[in-house]
Image (cartoon, rainbow, N blue to C red):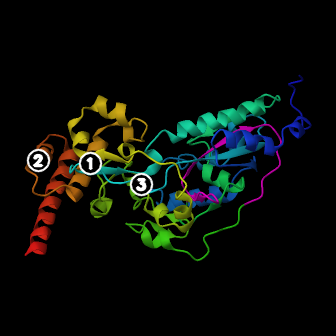
Amino acid sequence: MNNEPSDDVVEDLPIGDLRSVALAAGLVALGVAVVEPFVDTLAILEQRKAEGLHGGMQFTYRDPKRSTDPARLLPGARSLVVGAWPYAGGDVDRPVDGAPHGRVARYATGDHYGALRQALELVADRIRAVGFAARVVIDDNGLVDRAAAQRAGIGWFGHNANILVPGHGSWVVLGAIVTDAPFAESEPVPDGCGSCRRCLDGCPTGAIIAPGVVDARRCLAWLVQAPGSFPIEHRVALGDRIYGCDDCQEVCPPSRRGSQGAIPVAPDGAWVGLMSLLDSDDAELIERHGRWYIPKRDPRYLRRNALIALGNVADPSDGTIRSKIAAFAASDDEMLAEHACWALDRLDERSVSVGLAGA
């Protein structure tokens, strides 16, 4: 077989063929975007960074000119083949063992990005088999994957700034293949949000300040990953969350409809025992939760989040929990001591509220 790439070879590899490979591998959508700079996205990233809306987030904000120019990813690149992998979006029952648990966002309950990469590699192998170059790009600072997905006709930009895939909503993770194969660009998906503002009104901190505009300084999904002290004004709103936040997806009508047929998730992936986060050593925490983005790979941030969650949801009369938190409050670790003191104050506050309610 002649493996020299040419414009004619792609005629033997229609996008329908790639889509069949993709769907068989578990992807729920596949589309093609041309490799041209995302000029509008670059302007948006630079404007929001200048306004501070990125909240210090580095992903795609570190170098907007790089992340909005996919041609830098592969010499001679001509197409982006973008795919969506589904993950569980349905309700997950809270554990009933009586111990306090922390909630984990659905996308982090399993290695969904690993599954996405495997599926896209199968598609990329099909492209390579006819002589073209193909590089899989997933969760990478070098590509604005949501903008690529919109251009590739995967879905539309929702008012919560997520890509909404018809039939699946935003319960997907996105990845792309950059290739020198000259595929035809896919048709865009029209906006499906209309005048709906459920995500704006349903955000617990009001982080969605306009349709499609998120202030990361208020976004719980970012704040649990951000280094330093967790903003005190958002600690109560964090509730029992320790990683991620799904609220803007859970109230979204297309995502609610899409989640009905989503992959089920095991409760032990969606919930983590809060005391185990305080009792485990660093190595154990990294082994169990190393797939998550943890600032500086420092497990102390998992404990920080757990302390806040305990203050919000633990039984205020549980002496064992109070003793554990008090030990952190008295420790030499300034960050953890600060959050532990807040947790104890929060438990006291809740104890008073419970007493007043029972009076």
Classify 10 Å Cα crowding around label 1: few (below 14), some (14-19), many (20 and above): many
Disc 2 target residue? 326
- Residue 320: horizontal and vertical position, in percent? 10, 46
What element does badge 3 sit on? Answer: helix
Q: What amino acid is at disc 2? A: Ala
Q: What amino acid is at disc 3? A: Ala
Could one spot residue 236 in this view of the protein? Answer: yes
Among numbered discs 1 and 3, the one appearing first in the sequence: 3
Which residue is rendered at x = 41% and y = 59% of the image? 219
**Mark 1 to mark 3 CA distance (whole Å):** 15 Å
Q: Are marks 1 and 2 in contact (CB under 8 Å)?
A: no
What residue range appears in magenta?
Answer: 162-188
Which residue is rendered at x = 13% and y = 44% of the image? 324
Could one spot residue 133 in this view of the protein? Answer: no
Q: What amino acid is at disc 1? A: Ala
Classify 10 Å Cα crowding around label 3: few (below 14), some (14-19), many (20 and above): some
Q: Which one is in front, 329 or 289? A: 289
Q: Which one is in front, 265 or 143? A: 265
Tally the numbered discs.
3
**Mark 1 to mark 2 CA distance (whole Å):** 14 Å
Q: Is residue 128 above or below residue 163?
A: above
Disc 3 target residue? 221
* Residue 110 forms part of the magenta stretch: no
* Residue 176 forms part of the magenta stretch: yes
What element does badge 2 sit on? Answer: helix
Q: Quadrant of the C terminus?
A: bottom left
- Residue 94: horizontal and vertical position, in percent? 32, 53
Q: Are marks 2 and 3 in contact (CB under 8 Å)?
A: no
Disc 1 target residue? 306
Classify 10 Å Cα crowding around label 2: few (below 14), some (14-19), many (20 and above): some
